[in-house]
Amino acid sequence: MPELDHRRIECGVHIELLLACHATRLTHLGLISSRCVSVAGVLMNNPVHDLPLQHLTGFTHRWVDADGVRLHAVEGGRTGGPAVVLLAGFPQTWWAWRKVMPRLAERFHVIAIDLPGQGHSERPERGYDTHTAASHVHAAVTALGVSSYSLAAHDIGAWVAFSLALGFENHLRRVALLDAGIPGVTLPETIPTDPDRAWKTWHFAFHTVPELPEALLAGREREYVGWFLTVKALSPSTFDDAELDHYAAAVAADGGLRASLAYYRDAAESARRNREALQQRRLTVPVLGISSSQGSIPDMAASLSPCADDTTGIVVPDAGHFIPDEQPDAVADALTEFLADGH
């Protein structure tokens, strides 16, 4: 039997599961290779079977139980080195960091995690406020054997990272937040009606409406995701068709649309819990705010300084909202300098 290519698995979901369930026995009989067993293990652990995996050289896919929710992590870099955890936002997955990860891996232990409901992580029915999501992310990092780490997070990933810093600051070395308004802190309570500004935030209200987004978007995820990735990037050609297909498939797969919307629907609870935590204390962990020349938040550091003792900021030129995709070298340089200062 020819050996399976672990980078591309073309068989259908039912065949994958059959192989996964019987891989060890088939290996003992000499019918499949040990690499097939490795592939089968991935298939057994992966809760989102109908979404193809994206592979990055030097990195390994892992799934861990994170307080009852199975989260997907992509891990690589320096074993035993200082750890940095990367979180992405809507409508992306861990793949948003693919251009930055190899650079960071030269000096750091790099872990990119799909949030609950995102990418190849499990899609729970509830619990999408950012404090609950943050507890799952921290549990995943702990399950990977990491007790102290830094965070770099974009968009909704930054929402979760901010709440994680409020709840688990003693485990964090540094936090970098990219182009995101934080619920209860810097996220506006109202949506502007001026067309020159409304196009950046109109979806916050739309996503909170019960049932209507699902009715309008189911089966049209490619068009919807494509709008965000082409309009909110400075260059409409930032993302190629394969990338648009991947992100659309991630939103469409196994309750991904429901989960994506749930972060917005739980944003009021996220805001309430953030405000409640900030009444008790400010952040003391060093925070780097990364904005872009054409992004959503002109000055991340200034917006965060009222609730954090140690904030610095940079503005990445020639980029829109999706800074790690648009200017990966600038992001990698900024993160390397900032994170290295803590070690």
Image (cartoon, grey):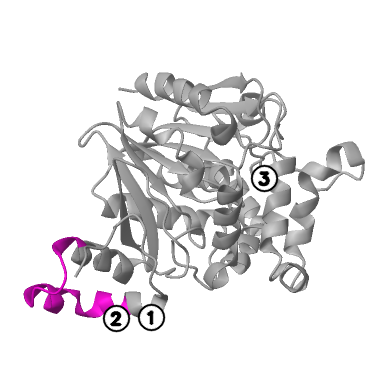
* Magenta-colored stretch includes residue 272: no
Residue displayed at 44% across by 67% down: 122
| Mark 1 or mark 3, whichever is nearer to me | 1
* Magenta-colored stretch includes residue 19: yes
- The amino acid type found where label 3 is placed reads Leu
- The amino acid type found where label 1 is placed reads His
Task: Evaluate if marks 2 and 1 touch, with contact meaning CB atoms under 8 Å apart.
Answer: yes
* Rendered view: 187 above or below 28: above
Q: Position of residue 38 (x, y in %)?
A: 21, 62
The residue beneath circle 1 is: 14
The residue carrying pointer 1 sits among few (fewer than 14), some (14 to 19) or many (20 or more) residues within 10 Å by Cα, namely few
Q: Position of residue 232 (x, y in %)?
A: 72, 40
Q: Choose the circle earlier in sequence order: 3 or 2.
A: 2
- The amino acid type found where label 2 is placed reads Leu
* Rendered view: 35 above or below 340: below
Disc marking residue 18: 2
Q: Position of residue 295 (x, y in %)?
A: 70, 32
Residue 241 visible (yes or no): yes
Task: Evaluate if marks 3 and 2 touch, with contact meaning CB atoms under 8 Å apart.
Answer: no
The residue beneath circle 3 is: 229
- Residue placed furthest toward the right: 194
Which span of residues is magenta-colored? 17-35
Secondary structure found at label 3: helix
Q: Position of residue 162 (x, y in %)?
A: 53, 42
Residue displayed at 33% across by 74% down: 16
Q: Choose the circle earlier in sequence order: 1 or 3.
A: 1
Magenta portion: prevailing SS class: helix
Secondary structure found at label 1: helix
Q: Quadrant of the C terminus?
A: top left
